[in-house]
Every structure is written in C-alpha cells, then in structure tokens.
Image (cartoon, helix red, strand yellow):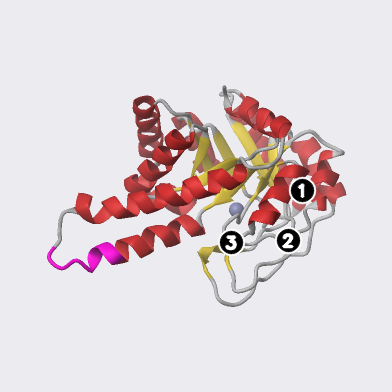
Amino acid sequence: MNLIDTLKEARKNKWSLGQFNFSTADQLQGIAMAAKEMNTPVICGTSEGESSFFGIEEAVAMVRAIEKKEKTKLFLNFYHGKDVNILKKAVDSGYDMVHFDGSGLPIDENIELTKEVVFYARRKNVLVEGELGQILGSSAMHLKGPKQSTLTSIEKVVKFVEQTGVDGVALDVGNVHGIYEEMPSLRLDRVSELLSFVECFVALHGGSGVSREDIKNAILKGVVKININTELRCAWRKSLEQALEKEGEVAPYKILFPAKEAVKEKVKEKINIFKSCPK
Ligand SMILES: [Zn+2]
C-alpha cells in the first residue's frame, strides 16, 4: 500500500502511523527493526538539520536498501522543511512525503509557498503536509515551560487546507516539540472539529512525552500520524553514554549496538500504543 492509502486505512481502523526521526544509520536500523518485529509500516523522518547531516539522497538510498532487505514498509518524510528548494530536492530524490513548514510566515505567503510545494510534489505522487499556527519548542529535553502557542482558528485551517490542496496538516492542539517538566493539556476536540469540515490527514507533532491516554484520545479523534523524536534521541544518548563507559572500547559497531537496540525498543513501545485503540 502507498502512503495515502495506509493513512486512510489507519483512520478507518483507528490506529496511527508513527513518524520516527533519525540522523544516524544505527538509529534508522533500530527504527526499521522495530517496524519489522511489529509487522507494521512506519514513517522515517528527517528534519532540515538531520538531512543536512545524513544527506538527502543518502537517506533515500539507505531507507530503500533496508526496506528491501528486511521486507518491511518504510516511508520517508522530510520534516519541517522551510526552504521550498530543499523540499523539491527531497521530492526528486524519492521521499514519500514532504512537510512544508510555513507557519512562521504571514498566512497568504504560507498558502502561496505551500501551493507551490503541492504542485511540485503531486507530479511525483509525493504527499505534502502543511502547517499553520506554530507548534513551538524543539526536540530536546526541557525543564521549564512549555510555551504554548495561541491556537489558530479552525476556520483558518480549513481555508488553508482547501486553498493549498495539501494532503495533511500538522494541527496545533496546544502541543509542543520536546519534553517538559509539565506537559501541556491538549485540545484534541480540534481534530474532530477540523475533520468535520475537510478531508485530510491530521498529524500530531511533539508526540514525545504525551501520555498514553492523550495519544489514544488523539487517535480516536482522527489523528493518523504521530511524530516521535525527543524520546528516541534520549534513549539513544543514554545507551551511548553507558557504552562509552567501557574503557578502551573503540569499535563503533560495539559502541553503537546498544544504542540501536535502545531506539528499536522505544519505537516498539510507541507502535504498541499507536495500535492499541479499541476497534
Ligand atoms: Zn513538528
């Protein structure tokens, strides 16, 4: 199944695809192993920073190589792209989806640029996720906060979806990127409200640190894509720190093996939650 059909099937059967970000090969291998063991497709994601580190063509090549070898479906999304030209490159290189983040722009400019990305991506059957209303924070551990955005009116989001023709939207429901001492309460009623006006997929950003209950509620309201990054980064780092404590070990494959396993376990834990809603 292609990505749009998979997202539609998820909506119908009340589960959510996970988007798991990576910037190193061992992280990507961990994500793929989890997808294989859980027998489910996943979306692998790279942000601007992650793809400039890993390489756009390299990300596509490695995702396709692992997918073929492991016989498991891996989709690839360019996450929070703010540069239209980089997104066009991702489309040409073989990404399955690109997320244009024009949320920091005036709405008219955001609509114009999103339309340009949609027009370009359509020709290659690449999906586009748009964003209106900024989702604040960054994929890291934070102690204080969160800074919540003022929620964009659903009317504006409907207009944005209709005028741009995006396949999906990163809806702000009071969510933030990263993990905070106190996680914000989510306005998940906004998801069903939006879906009562337009047909599109709804993505939940900043899924790290969100409670199991909120995740399930989000899925029941119609969310079909949940992004996880910070929790994977934390699991990766913790395990790497432990491995580096072993004095004298210099073989990268020995040092990184536990980190790969840690990412795999974290992804499996998330997939379990994303697929556990009552049908
Ligand atoms: Zn995001």
**Is residue 65 something that shows in the picture?**
yes
Number of the front mark, 1 or 2: 2
Q: Which residues are magenta?
A: 242-248
Indicate whether residue 127 is drawn in magenta.
Answer: no
Around disc 3, counting alpha carbons within 10 Å, would you say few (fewer than 14), some (14 to 19), or many (20 or more)? some
Indicate whether residue 243 is drawn in magenta.
Answer: yes
Q: Relative to 7, does residue 134 appear above or below in the rendering?
A: below
Residue 274 sits in which quadrant? top right
Camera-nearest residue between 47 and 37: 37
| Location of residue 23 in the rendering, given as x and y in whole percent from the top left corner | 39, 50
Q: CA distance from mark 1 to mark 2?
A: 23 Å
Determine which residue is flagged by label 1: 108
| Location of residue 20 in the rendering, given as x and y in whole percent from the top left corner | 50, 46
| Location of residue 175 in the rendering, given as x and y in whole percent from the top left corner | 68, 59
Identified by mark 3, the residue type is Gly
Around disc 1, counting alpha carbons within 10 Å, would you say few (fewer than 14), some (14 to 19), or many (20 or more)? few
Determine which residue is flagged by label 3: 209
Determine which residue is flagged by label 2: 174
